[in-house]
Image (cartoon, grey):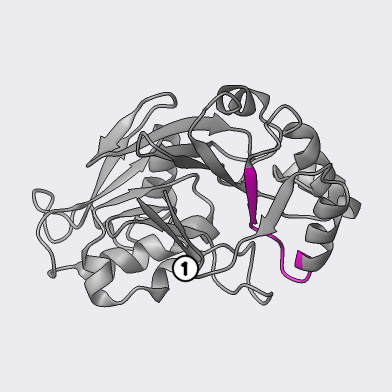
Amino acid sequence: MKLRVLGCAGGIGGRERLTTCFRIDDDILLDAGTGLTTLDMDELIKIEHVFLSHSHLDHIAGLALLADAVLGKRSGAVTIHATEKVIATLKSHFFNWLIWPDFTTIPTAENPVLRWEPLRHGDTIELDGRVIKPNQVNHSVDATGYWVHNRTAGFLFTGDMSTTAPLWEKMRAEPILRKVIVDCSFTNADFELAEVSGHFCPSSLIEDIKAMPHTTDFLIYHLKPGQEEMIMQELKRDSGGRSFEALSCGDTFEF
């Protein structure tokens, strides 16, 4: 199982320019931010499943462009996996014919480009040997983190989140967990902003993961533009021996 970082930025104008999107092998996406725009047409056509962590624009903008790009170029719909709340939000506020056409009815309702697949936290989805389990996380809107593995090794993608003790309680005993991709958006000086917006800063992240094994690698994403260096300095200064590394677009991992 191969994981490739297409986008990992917490905004535009910083060290990383593309927002959240990860590709698993050739056919699965975790989120659909502007990182999706790095794929060429042949790669876009191969996408079969998109798992959304939440409904914020930096995680869904590429979904609109994906639907438009593959229209008439593939057979069958791309399946969009998300919670009922996220699906309802996208139907009402995004694919509503005002912001963007409803591609679940284009070219016809019987043969659409996109199809919704509601998921529930705690369910297990298996796709050709890749196991994907959604877990609820705390954010400013309904949000999901994904535990992804192939029964031999795997990773956790938290999506955007703040303190979520039950998630770490579940994950700390997973023997095949190799890496955690986790949000750390703000510096410690912006602790209150991080709290109100449902994100981590270094001090809150380190506190939240204190029960996790020190052997777990933490890969940091969603750093806010202009704050990347300070966030990583604060994480490493107070790490207590943990491994924290900032993700970059193009990073690839094998599991």
Q: Nearer the viewer, residue 129 or 19?
A: 129
Dot 1 amino acid type: Gly
Left or right: residue 241 compared with residue 98:
right
What residue sits 76% from the left and 31% below the top?
210
In the rendered image, which residue does mark 1 sit on?
35
Magenta stretch encompasses residue 230: no
Q: Position of residue 131 (x, y in %)?
A: 34, 36
Residue 207 placement (x, y as % from top left) = 80, 34
Query: Outermost residue, right direction?
Result: 189
Write the residue at 63% across / 46% down: 217
What residue span does the magenta drawing correspond to? 217-228
Height in image: 100 above or below 124?
below
Closest to the observer: 92 or 59?
A: 59
Residue at point 79%, 48% (across, down): 201
Few, some or many residues within 10 Å of mark 1 (<14, 14–19, 20+): many
- Residue 233: image location, x then y, percent: 84, 60
Would you place residue 142 above or below residue 63 in this image?
above
